[in-house]
Image: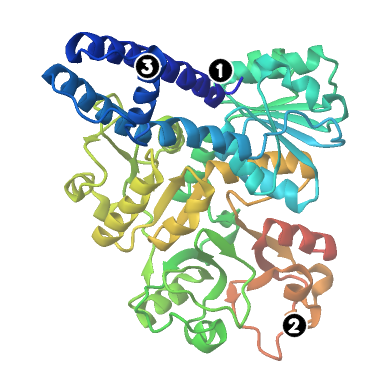
Amino acid sequence: MLRSQKRLLVLVASLILVLVICALLYMVGMNQLEGQTRSFWRSLEFVAETLSTTGYGADDTWSNPLMVLFVVLLQFLGVCLIFMIFPVYLIPYLEERFEVRLPKEAEDATNHVLIYRFGPAVATLVDELQRASIPTVIIEQDETVARRLIEAGHQVVSGSLEDGILSRVNLQRARSLIANSTDDEDAAVILAARQSGFEGEALALVEEPFHRKPIMLAGATATYTPRHILGAALAARASQRVSPTVADAQQLGRKLKVSEVRIPKGSRLAGQTLAEASLGQRTGITVIGQWVEGRLVAPTTADMRLEPDGILVLVGSPTSVQKFEELCDEAKPLRRHGPVVVAGFGEVGGKVVELLSDVGEEVVVIDRQERDGVKVVGDVLDPRVLEQAGVGSAKAVILAVDTDSATMFATVIVKDLAPHVPVIARVNRAENVERIYRAGADFALSISQVSGQILARRLLGEEAVSLDPQLKVLKVGAGGLAGRHPSQLGIRQKTGCSVVAVERGEDLMMEFGPDFRFESEDAIFVCGSSEATRIFLKMFPQG
């Protein structure tokens, strides 16, 4: 029986009891105090008229003060009942009677992905599966969440493991099962699925790493800890030692260097295309990528717009990089020294600190609680705390706090105190990522994106998002490219890679005029994404 039905029955029983008691009291009062005989049924009629505020019939005056007080109390009780019955009892009852009943089974589903419990960790995956036209059935016991998902167009079955929900979702025909509840419930769900004969993939999103083995023993095909992967991605963006922007940059040697430079909003370069800025002709550098709201734009094109607050990835000789910095004095190279300030020392923040410390980075941790590893105790939303942590001289600031609203506000405060320091933010809900970018964050990543990529790779065989996009540099021999100009080969058009420099003996050439031709002894520096460099090596194996 629904809760509103139970409440309605209690209401009816209570009203009958109140009417009977009040009728008996009125009958006795009229007989003893007023000296007028009233039957029970006439007394009941009077009490019903009074409590319902519809009138008093034949009785409208009383002489005894006690009877007057009794009638006054009945009147106020009637008014109170009117205002209480409708919102507390009748309206909820009517809402439940007329609202859509939650589905209790999905026995017609086939080749579907079953997700046990919805939450931020699977939100991106659900969208990815929907775009890929893969049927998805979400098992959800929270009625509010279930109704919201149904309104969003998702197939939902209401129930829990205890009421045998797995027997009503055509489990044997499912392509995979994803457990996204607490670790103990994940283990119970997977164990129940295996006991019922399910042989498909059973994946679990685990909160505690030490629970991975027990869940695997329960029958999971694979287990993942998205919070730790999220911490690793944040650490990779903060430190070149964890994950350099340009992999294999050591191949550049001493003649070339990589630099990342921020284009401020007020810069004369902001808004220009790469062709209009003519950076290569004016300084000798090559722009191989641009970071815009955490997204690496590569390869670059002549019509690529230099975004305000974007970060350009440059390759050039030390002289050309210095010339660029002198030409664009308002553009600020990202600091490669100084501490990394980490705000928040929870599970994600702790993983970030662990990774950064392992590679020798200096880390300053801000947290509200005083404990081992915390250097500054205080609220990250207090500018004085940020100044005490040395945010102005930091290499980067990583925000790993509890709520997205605090992350958004802290981003604004950090950008006000240190506009040129990169802000790297952990986000709880994927829909808040864009808002935090607007607040000024350079890189923002949610647990939903992390889980989405992990599971999408597993289920769809593709990447949903890129956690740590990276450029690679190749140093290859000219080989069969000798005698040809880079434009004749169409390297950029065919592979997405850029030829950034050619080493010929002791000379380093970064400009390739119409008379330039590769020579067999040349060393060619090629830069591009991991996928682009793979395509280059496949198309030009002689290099």
10 Å neighbourhood of mark 1: few (<14), some, or many (≥20)? few
Q: Which residue is denoted by mark 3 in the rendering?
A: 18
Q: Nearer the viewer, residue 464 or 172?
A: 172
The local secondary structure at tag 2 comes to: helix
Q: Depth-wise, is mark 1 or mark 3 nearer the camera?
A: 3
Q: Is residue 23 left or right of residue 86?
A: left
Identified at 31% across, 52% down, the residue is: 409
In this view, which residue lies farthest toward the bottom? 514
The local secondary structure at tag 1 comes to: helix
Identified at 67% across, 72% down, the residue is: 499
In this view, which residue lies farthest toward the front? 36
The amino acid type of the residue labelled 3 equals Val
Give x and y (percent) for residue 59. 28, 27
Q: Is residue 421 left or right of residue 1?
A: left
10 Å neighbourhood of mark 3: few (<14), some, or many (≥20)? some
Q: Depth-wise, is mark 1 or mark 2 nearer the camera?
A: 1
The amino acid type of the residue labelled 1 equals Phe
Residue 487: mark = 2
Q: Depth-wise, is mark 2 or mark 3 nearer the camera?
A: 3
The amino acid type of the residue labelled 2 equals Ser
Residue 254, relative to residue 324: is it above or below?
Answer: above
Residue 228: mark = none
In this view, which residue lies farthest toward the left? 65
The local secondary structure at tag 3 comes to: helix
Q: CA distance from mark 1 to mark 2?
A: 55 Å
Give x and y (percent) for residue 361. 39, 41
Which tag, 2 or 3, sits closer to the chain's start? 3
10 Å neighbourhood of mark 2: few (<14), some, or many (≥20)? few
